[in-house]
């Protein structure tokens, strides 16, 4: 069943158009990669879906049209967007950051249980729970950004370039965690990545944006074997 349906989507920054008539579908429980070079419109796509940017066309999420749904309401519906560049609160501890992420869960005991769950998934964060987020390594901060997003209990988790500035081994670790969330919690994932070859080892399928348009799509396997994709992306960006 289609979980997220993007149809004829266009998005603008003032008079500048950044997305042109984009359409694609994501099923519930899929792990989807959104690929494309710098300035292609990847971040813009996530912003339109999470409600940070108005759009033309239609976005249907779990049967609801998002045109008139405000960003906060979309978050309550389970659409969580982890922005590019991490965005943790550096002057707060790891644990406080997780508390701040629990934007929609009411009871204290639930928040506590959720925290423990994500500390199990990210043992490094557990060890550093009382450390200031600003003193974490780049990879640890990225894990914190993901864990904080998870505190909102996403059904659709969108993450913008989780591996930015990180070593390939940490990138592998983060993508492995996404795969586990996808497999064990049935979470639907839309992940923007420039490390295309690593990402395609984990994702089910991928869409490629170029100059604001979807120019290719297919299963991860099809992408890996696609000559154009190979030439343009695989092994090209690190
Ligand atoms: N706040 C903004 N105001 C005006 N134009 C913007 C703004 N943000 C992005 N753009 C433009 O929209 C286009 C798409 O940008 P976007 O940030 O979505 O690209 P991206 O694919 O995420 O790139 P990157 O890989 O570098 O993060 C670019 O041409 C960019 O210059
Ligand atoms: Mg971007």
Image (cartoon, grey):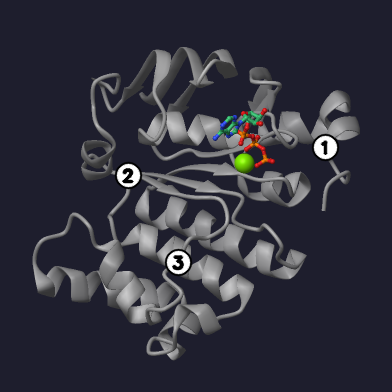
**Ligand 1 found in image quarter:** top right
Q: Residues within 10 Å of mark 1 (few under 14, many from 20)?
A: many
Picture coordinates of residue 98, whole percent (x, y): 32, 71
Residue at numbered disc 3: 88
Q: CA distance from mark 1 to mark 2?
A: 29 Å
- Callout 2: CB less than 8 Å from ligand 2: no
User: On the picture, is 106 further left or further right than 16?
Assistant: left
Between circles 3 and 1, the one closer to the viewer is 3
The structure residue drawn at horizontal position 38% and vertical position 58%, both measured from the top left corner, is 149
Residue at numbered disc 1: 233
Q: CA distance from mark 2 to mark 3?
A: 21 Å
Specify the quadrant of the image occupied by residue 105: bottom left
Picture coordinates of residue 192, whole percent (x, y): 60, 42
Q: Residues within 10 Å of mark 2 (few under 14, many from 20)?
A: many
The structure residue drawn at horizontal position 43% and vertical position 29%, both measured from the top left corner, is 48
The structure residue drawn at horizontal position 45% and vertical position 35%, both measured from the top left corner, is 47
Q: Is residue 154 above or below residue 210?
A: below
In this orientation, which residue lies closer to the viewer: 202 or 61? 61
Q: Residues within 10 Å of mark 3 (few under 14, many from 20)?
A: many
Residue at numbered disc 2: 155
For the question of whether residue 117 can be seen, the reply is no
Q: CA distance from mark 3 to mark 1?
A: 29 Å
* Sequence-first tag of 2 and 3: 3
Mark 3 lies on a secondary structure that is loop
């Amino acid at each position: 069943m289609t979980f997220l349906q993007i149809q004829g989507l266009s998005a603008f920054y003032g008079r500048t158009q950044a997305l042109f008539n984009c359409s694609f579908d994501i099923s519930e429980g899929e792990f989807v990669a959104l690929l494309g070079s710098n300035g292609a419109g990847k971040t813009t796509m996530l912003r339109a879906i999470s409600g940070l940017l108005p759009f033309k066309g239609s976005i249907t999420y779990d049967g609801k049209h998002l045109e008139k749904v405000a960003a906060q309401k979309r978050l309550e519906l389970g659409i969580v967007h982890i922005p590019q560049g991490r965005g943790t609160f550096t002057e707060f501890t790891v644990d406080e950051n997780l508390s701040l992420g629990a934007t929609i869960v009411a009871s204290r005991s639930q928040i506590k249980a959720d925290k423990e769950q994500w500390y199990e998934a990210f043992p490094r964060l557990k060890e550093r729970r009382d450390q200031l987020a600003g003193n974490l390594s780049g990879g640890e901060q990225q894990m914190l950004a993901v864990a904080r997003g998870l505190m909102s209990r996403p059904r659709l988790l969108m993450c913008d370039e989780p591996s930015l500035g990180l070593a390939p081994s940490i990138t592998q670790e983060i993508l492995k965690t996404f795969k586990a969330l996808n497999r064990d919690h049935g979470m639907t994932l839309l992940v923007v990545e420039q490390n295309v070859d690593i990402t395609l080892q984990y994702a089910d399928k991928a869409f490629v944006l170029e100059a604001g348009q979807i120019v290719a799509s297919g299963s991860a396997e099809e992408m890996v074997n696609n000559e154009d994709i190979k030439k343009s992306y695989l092994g090209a960006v690190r």
